[in-house]
Amino acid sequence: MASLDVGCGSRPRGDVNIDIKLSDEWKRYGNRDFIYCDAHYLPLRSNSFDEAFCFVVLPYVRNEIQVVRELSRVLKIDGKAVIEHNLLSIYLKDLFKNTRQPLNIVRRIYLYFFRHNVQNPTINTFQTKRGIVNLLRTNNFSITEVRKINNVLHVEAKRRS
């Protein structure tokens, strides 16, 4: 059962691990393959993996749709994709990236924590539970499990034919 970890960082989980940063800690994991590449264009054969992991990667890529398409391409039919998001860090990253005035930051944090029904137009729709589920469904996946534990969203999906 071959597994792929896209954006493995310093904790690889797959048989083949991909990241855009080289890490000295990778040397500890001698029996695993590491590929230094961009997740938008995976240099891997189609239909070659049974599982793919993508932990807190999608918020940091340029094009979430392209990354999910690449995951779908390299997974076998009925292959499992596991995607996790830290929803709070996504929101705060976006908040600080788009706002430099301290009072505006405080106001937006208040609106996020105490007025959840207030929509923030700067947040990408793929950075919400509904957005991630729709992104997977429209890119050849069927959702098998969605859990939210604290601020971590855990989504498991199978690739359709």
Image (tube, rainbow, N blue to C red):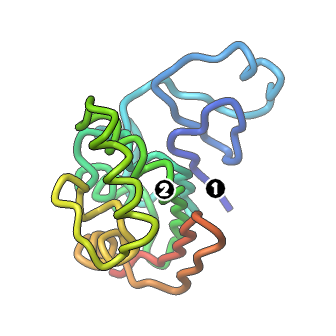
Q: Secondary structure at mark 1?
A: loop
Residue 10 position by quadrant = top right
Mark 1–mark 2 contact, CB under 8 Å? Answer: yes
Residue 3 visible somewhere in the drawing: yes
Q: Amino acid at mark 2?
A: Ser
Left or right: residue 59 versus residue 6 is left
The 10 Å Cα crowd at callout 2, few under 14, some 14 to 19, many 20 or more, is: some
Circle count: 2
Residue lying at the far front in this picture: please name it: 103
In the rendered structure, the answer to whether residue 67 lies left or right of residue 129 reads left
Few, some or many residues within 10 Å of mark 1 (<14, 14–19, 20+): few
Residue 36 in the image: state x and y as whole percent: 48, 23
| Tag of residue 73 | none
Residue position for label 2: 48
Between 96 and 1, the one lying in front of the other is: 96
Left or right of residue 145: residue 23 = right
Which residue is rendered at x = 38% and y = 63% of the image? 112
**Seen in the image, is 30 located left or right of residue 138?**
right
Disc 1 residue type? Ala
Q: Which residue is mark 1?
A: 2
Residue 89 % position (x, y): 49, 48
Instruction: State whether residue 23 is above or below residue 114.
Output: above
Q: Identify the residue shown where x is 27% and y is 29%.
A: 100
Q: Which corner quadrant holds the C terminus?
A: bottom left
At 28% across and 58% down in the image, what residue appears? 69
Q: Nearer the viewer, residue 115 or 91?
A: 115
